[in-house]
Amino acid sequence: MSQPIEYEFTSKQFKAFQELVRVHTGIAISDEKKELIYGRLTRRLRRLKMDSFEEYYQLVKSGDNEELENFINAVTTNLTSFFREAHHFEHMKTVLIPKLLEQNATSKKIRIWSAGCSTGEEPYSIAITLMESIPDIHHWDVKILATDIDSEVLAKAKSGIYKAERIEELPQEMIKQWFKRGKGSKEGFVRVAPELQSLITFRQLNLLADWPVKGPFDILFCRNVVIYFDKPTQKILFEKFSNVLAAHGHMYIGHSETLYKISDDFELLGQTIYKKCA
Ligand SMILES: C[S@@+](CC[C@H](N)C(=O)[O-])C[C@H]1O[C@@H](n2cnc3c(N)ncnc32)[C@H](O)[C@@H]1O
């Protein structure tokens, strides 16, 4: 078997790619990630049968849309899971949904945004929580907007098909109710129930660009996304999030994220749960 080609990847080239990623995604790639980025981008170089990082850089920089999309897909980190940071779903079920059922009793509307939804486990967990805590949900106008910059993860999210091992830790009752196990060639995979899918609209959206979103949202999930952004970008982002949240809106962020010294528009309720200030 022939050895895969190794490419030269100088510090200067790495810096140029760091800047390209920052401009297009807001993601600040740290200097320690040189090897990781090398690994992810060499796959693109090989696929395109290119000889050097310089050649690839010129292609992406030229604004070749198709490759810019592949480039962005290659540099994003998409780690996620069903009911990740489970306390947010518990809070939603026991505190926020009962409140919303009262507050929005006239409009009978609930709007939720999962920003940076990756492969969909987060919005499907939201959908399950809604279904299981609103007995007359069919009389309500409930919509979840699920967005991500990465077109590949979004396609996966939309399909609603997962490896069965992804749901192993969920309660048996939940699995029975909301997932169908594949048979034959689909053995080892599960598909989410169409009722969950019907609550969700998946859209490609770059949080750094314009947001064609309506709002106002009652609840916003933006978890484990801004951790990759620098502080000035986070400041801009949370101001925009505050603007699309309803007056009584709440926001969940990731376990290692904080709004401390980033935004004064939110009050911390505890455990990365925020409420928009009056
Ligand atoms: C680590 S995943 C988090 C998934 C999920 N929110 C969770 O907590 O499990 C981060 C996601 O943010 C997305 N992302 C990164 N930069 C983005 C940007 N500028 N606009 C929109 N999404 C972005 C990535 O593509 C990735 O899917």
Image: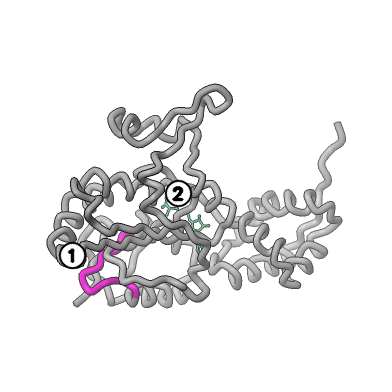
Q: Which residue does the image show at 62% across and 60% down from the upper left?
A: 72
Q: Position of residue 254 (x, y in %)?
A: 37, 56
Q: What residue type is labelled 2?
A: Gly
| Residue at the image point whose x is 41% and y is 48% from the top | 197
- Find disc 2 in the rendering and name its residue: 120
Can residue 253 be seen from the camera position used here?
Answer: no
Amino acid beneath label 1: Asn
**Boundaries of the magenta span:** 244-253
Expressed as whole percent of the image width and height from the top left, the position of residue 85 reads 33, 47
Q: Of marks 2 and 1, which one's residue comes earlier in the chain?
A: 1
- Residue 143 horizontal side relative to residue 16, left or right: left
- Is 247 one of the magenta-colored residues? yes
Q: Residue 178, located in which quarter of the rendered image?
A: top left
Q: Is residue 251 one of those drawn in magenta?
A: yes
For disc 1, the marked residue is: 104
How far across and how far down the image is residue 92, in percent?
Answer: 23, 53
- Res 45 label: none
Element assignment for label 2: loop
Tell me where residue 249 appears, x and y as whole percent.
25, 68
32 and 130: which is toward the camera:
130
Q: Quadrant of residue 95?
A: bottom left
The answer to which quarter of the image holds residue 1 is top right
SS for callout 1: loop
For the residue carrying disc 1, how many other residues have a C-alpha within 10 Å: few (<14), some (14-19), or many (20+)?
Answer: few
22 or 132, nearer to the observer: 132
- Identified at 21% across, 62% down, the residue is 108
